[in-house]
Amino acid sequence: MDLLVSYDVNTLTKEGRRRLRRVAKICTGHGQRVQFSVFEVTVNEVRHQILRQMLIDTIDHKEDSLRIYVLRGGRDDALEAFGRDGYVDYTGPLIV
């Protein structure tokens, strides 16, 4: 299952900056950063629920915003990318 995770965390306070780092760390552990607050994630249903709950538990529901989009048909069917794109497809062969 391919997901697009985006978030907007209020960073006006020290606690907000801490939440921002925690949200980014959670997302980095599950996917690839494609923009500053946007991650592309490939997970199974169980990992999706775990990621979702971790993020919900981390944000401040009065100050922050979290959006998780399920990309039906997968990333390749849903994406049009223009400009710089640092995405790496880890499902295919990797040449080191």
Image: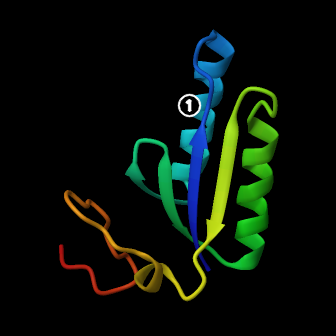
Whether residue 59 sits left or right of residue 5 in the image: it is: right
In the displayed structure, 37 sits above or below 50; it is above
Where residue 82 appears, x then y in whole percent? 24, 64
In which quadrant will I find the C terminus? bottom left
In the displayed structure, 29 sits above or below 24; it is below
Q: Residue at x 70, y 32 (%)?
A: 64
Amino acid type indicated by mark 1 = Arg
Give SS at disc 1.
helix
In which quadrant will I find the N terminus? bottom right
Taking depth in this image into account, of 75 and 51 the one nearest to the observer is 75
**How dense is the environment of label 1, judged by Cα within 10 Å: few (below 14), some, or many (20 and up)?**
few
Where residue 34 appears, x then y in whole percent? 38, 55
Taking depth in this image into account, of 24 and 60 the one nearest to the observer is 60
Q: Residue at x 74, y 35 (%)?
A: 59
For residue 21, what is the image quadrant? Answer: top right
Where residue 26 appears, x then y in whole percent? 61, 47
Whether residue 81 sits left or right of residue 73 in the image: it is: left
Where residue 44 appears, x then y in whole percent? 68, 78
Q: Residue at x 52, y 84 (%)?
A: 74
